[in-house]
Each structure stands twice: as C-alpha cells, then as structure tokens.
Amino acid sequence: MPLSGLPNFDPRRIPVDRIDTGLPAVGRERLQPDALQQRFAHPPRWQPEVAVEKKFTDRLPAHASVLLAVVMRDQPTVLLTERTAHLSTHSGQIAFPGGKVDDTDADAAATALREAHEEVGLDERNIEVIGTLPIYVTGSAFIITPVVALVRPGFVLHPNPDEVADAFEVPLEFLMNPANHHLQAFEWEGTRREWFSMPYQDHGKERFIWGATAGMLRNFYRFLSA
C-alpha cells in the first residue's frame, strides 16, 4: 500500500540518517497511568523537538486534533489506525484517530473524542483526557493539537471502513525508546526534508509509523524524558 500521495515516493526506501541509540529510554515506571497523570499535572520545562514541517502544499491551513490514546494494559499501549488507501490526504498512513475541528466542537479534546468515536467507535466513557502536547503543523497545512488520554481496556472497536483500514496497538515502551526512532532524510526539489520513523513489527506485519505521527510521538518522548 502506498504511504504517500507523492508519485514514486516511498518513505520506507529513504535512507536512515540517524538512529538515537545514545538517548535513554523512558523508564517503565514513567509510562504507568498514575505517572502520566502526574507528568501532565506538573509538567517539566521542555521544548518540542518537532513543531513545524516544511510545507509541500498550497492548501489553506486547517485546524485539527488527534487522540494520543494510551490504553491502560499491564504494559501500556498506544492506539493507532491505518488510513484507507482512497483518502485524499495521508492515505495508507499510520495515524492517531483524529481529524478536522468542527464548528460544534467545544475544544481540541472534544474534536479528538468525536473523531475517535467516528473513526473507530471508541466510546468517550472509556476515556480520560489528561492533557495536550504542543501544536504540530504538518507540511500539508494541518495545525494539529495532540490530545493525550488514558483509555480503559475492554472496549470493542468498530472501524469506519470509509476512513480506517485497520486499528491496532503498539507498546508505549517501544515508542518511548529512542533506539526505535529513525531519522530519515532526502533532497526534494532542492530542499532537504527529514522526518522520524518508528517501524514496528506487529505479528509479522510491519507498521511503518512515520511523518507527523512519529513526530508527535517524538515530542511525547521529549515531554516524558525531560
């Protein structure tokens, strides 16, 4: 399945410029629900590493929210989706549940919760929002607020086939270990473009997490490790 709308471009084939094996992983104790709640209640001084991607489209900017949903299993996981191939933007990519702000949404959290319900059937009664990460601006002109939430296990997902090809979970411990963070880079139209990727083997299937999703996860790592 293509992972980009650009012709003849496959991010999986772009060389890896750096793997951050020298950075410490976030300890397991910091990934537990109580610790995550405390981190947002008393945030450290920190700066997001990735905030604005280089623009590659002339679309008008659009505000959006995504739900960075931490499922409270014995070893916490993050809920992700694979977008369907026919979507006009970011088709086939791994993404958080989320989408554009609606005029009826009270705030960023409301957008993220509504979109998560519409995309995968996640009931907000199972969700506790604990905070937000800094705004992330994509090269496709989306101004995204990542909403971080804890999700009680036991839910049953119902992916919307018009938007979501699959929904799955990745261990938070894997995502918060920089040894799994690959910085990829290449030259396109005279401009160096780079992004993080976090390829994950899910029962023999590769889940290629990259671009904005990986960038927001990298910021989450910086927030938890600060």
Image (tube, grey):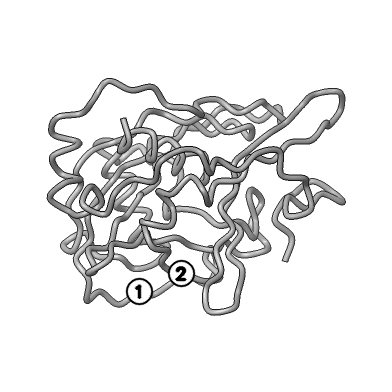
Q: Residue at position x 46%, y 69% from top?
A: 167
Dot 2 corresponds to which residue? 167
Tell me the residue at 74%/49% (across/down): 5
Please report contact status of discs 1 and 2: CB closer than 8 Å, yes or no. Answer: yes
Q: Which residue is drawn at 61% across and 45% down?
A: 182
Please determine whether, in this image, residue 199 is positioned above or below residue 17.
below
On screen, residue 135 versus residue 141, left or right, reads: left
Q: Mark 1 or mark 2: name the one nearer the start of the chain.
A: 1
Is 4 positioned to the left or the right of 52 in the image? Answer: right
Q: Where is residue 82 drawn, in percent x and y? A: 55, 63
Callout 2 crowding tier (Cα within 10 Å): few <14, some 14–19, many ≥20? some
Q: Toward the viewer: 217 or 127? A: 217
Position above or below: 224 against 115: above
Which amino acid, mark 1?
Answer: Leu
How many discs appear?
2
Q: What residue type is labelled 2?
A: Ala
Find disc 1 in the rendering and name its residue.
157
Instruction: Identify the residue at image location x=38%, y=63%.
Output: 171
Question: Does dot 1 land on a helix, a strand or a loop?
Answer: loop
Residue 150 x/y as whole percent: 22, 55
**Corner quadrant of residue 159:** bottom left
Quadrant containing the N terminus in the rendered view: bottom right
Indicate left or right for 85 with 133 as reference: right
- Where is residue 200? Give x, y as percent: 55, 63
> Which quadrant, please, contains the C terminus?
top left
Question: Residue 212, image x and y in percent?
Answer: 55, 41
Residue that protrudes farthest toward the front in the picture? 22
